[in-house]
Amino acid sequence: MTEIHIYGASWCPDCRRAKRFLSDQRIPFGWHDVDQEPQALGVVQERNGGNNVIPTIVFPDGSDLSEPTNEELAHKLGLSRMAMQHVYDLVVIGGGPTGLTTSIYTARENLRTLIVDSKGLGGQAGVTERLDNYPGFPEGVGGAELADRIVQQARRYGVEMLQAISVTQITSDGDELDVETATGDHYHARAALVATGSSYRRTGAEGEDDLIGAGIHFCATCDGPFYKASDQLVVLGGGNSGLEEGLFLTEFSQRVTIVERGERLKGNKVLQDKIAMHPRMEVLLNQAVERFVPKPDGSGKLGAIELRDLDTGRLVELHPAGVFVFIGLDPNTEVVKGQVDLDDRGFIVTDMGMQTSIPGVFAAGDVRSGSTKQLASAVGEGAAAAIAIRQFLESKAVQP
Ligand SMILES: Cc1cc2nc3c(=O)[nH]c(=O)nc-3n(C[C@H](O)[C@H](O)[C@H](O)COP(=O)(O)OP(=O)(O)OC[C@H]3O[C@@H](n4cnc5c(N)ncnc54)[C@H](O)[C@@H]3O)c2cc1C
């Protein structure tokens, strides 16, 4: 049941920030647009002495906050802002499946472990509607449920966890590491794991945020099978990923349409030839995504995608069963930028033992160069990193 209610407007940036903050923490809320619901404006005025102050957020205990900062929201929601100690054996940056798995292993071996996550614990898995290819769940499992289970398991072993706090920097004095957070706190660690994942680039078009997982997807291996026997799927992006994944999606759909913003496809010649010869694939060039439109039946699912022809300005509406976005993937490496070796796509390079070019700083999961961007691999890399970290700490302990 939704217990938190946000009153605001679609044009209000602070309202979008507050919605994003709650979504990031996977906290359900009701959204009331003051431009659409006359009674919503009444609530806002009643709560603000007759003034129109948005967002106004009403909590289950009946209290409210008007135009709160993220800090104020975190405080109200009871999220810890500071860890209990200043010194840890391991600080894990990123509480996705990778970081959580590492922490279960290390805390279980009595290493003092702190996880710091900039959003909500569970990472991308936590915001995935359904996972059908993670072993052990024959009927599939909801991403949020799986994430909650991993978090509970980490809690059971005493892992300390902070959420809604970004790590801004890791520095090494050659022996210990200093992990600095956006709140200005510093934690000392004997080792650190960077498990910050990567972010799929979005189009930024109207309607996109609300339809992610409900018709808009970023992973064909993960979500393609949901569209078995569909009439049409659209792939946004004509680079190698878009073309490869588009070919793969023909297994599920009668027709796959590749939409590219530029004047030509950017993927390699072999892939381009395969697509040109494929009887059930087509390519639309010079098309910009104008907006994503939900179905009118109130299901909250994707109904249409509107494209603008950049040559003629003409708008075209397609009605695919799903849209797969492959316009790039950015590794979240701000925290170590300029300090550790990165590959040519910006992912962190490690040795076989997940060690980066800074001794004591490890990297695993989607942020690591060569990772497969799959949950089962992320969990596996998390376990491998834990073992490598344990060995590193043991070798440090015996050094004179
Ligand atoms: C929509 C979607 C559907 C998917 N479906 C499937 C599927 O069906 N099957 C499958 O196997 N895989 C799927 N995946 C991929 C899978 O979720 C990822 O491979 C997995 O979550 C990677 O785990 P990770 O811990 O390495 O990174 P993430 O899950 O990305 O977690 C990284 C965490 O680090 C945090 N972080 C980033 N920067 C900082 C910072 N500076 N300070 C602190 N914290 C930070 C982030 O907030 C995030 O919580 C899907 C991914 C997406 C996006």
Image (cartoon, rainbow, N blue to C red):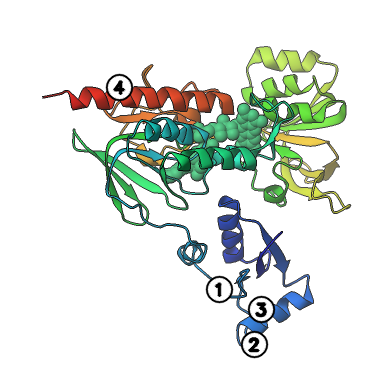
Q: Of all residues shown, which one is farthest toward the bottom?
A: 49
Q: How far separated are the C-alphas under marks 3 and 4?
A: 57 Å
Near-viewer residue (40 or 384)? 384
Please tell me whether mark 2 or mark 1 is closer to you in this view. Answer: 1
Residue at numbered disc 4:
391
- Asked if the residue at label 4 sits under 8 Å from ligand 1, the reply is no
- Asked if the residue at label 3 sits under 8 Å from ligand 1, the reply is no
The mark that comes first in sequence, 1 or 4, is 1
- On the rendered image, what quadrant is the N terminus found in? bottom right
Residue at numbered disc 1:
65
Secondary structure beneath dot 1 equals strand
Residue at numbered disc 3:
44
Q: Percent x, y for residue 77?
A: 52, 62
Near-viewer residue (179 or 289)? 179
Q: How far separated are the C-alphas under marks 1 and 4?
A: 48 Å
Q: Type of residue at label 1?
A: Leu
Please tell me whether mark 4 or mark 2 is closer to you in this view. Answer: 4
26 vs 49: above or below: above
275 vs 309: above or below: above
Near-viewer residue (92 or 323)? 92
Residue at numbered disc 2:
50
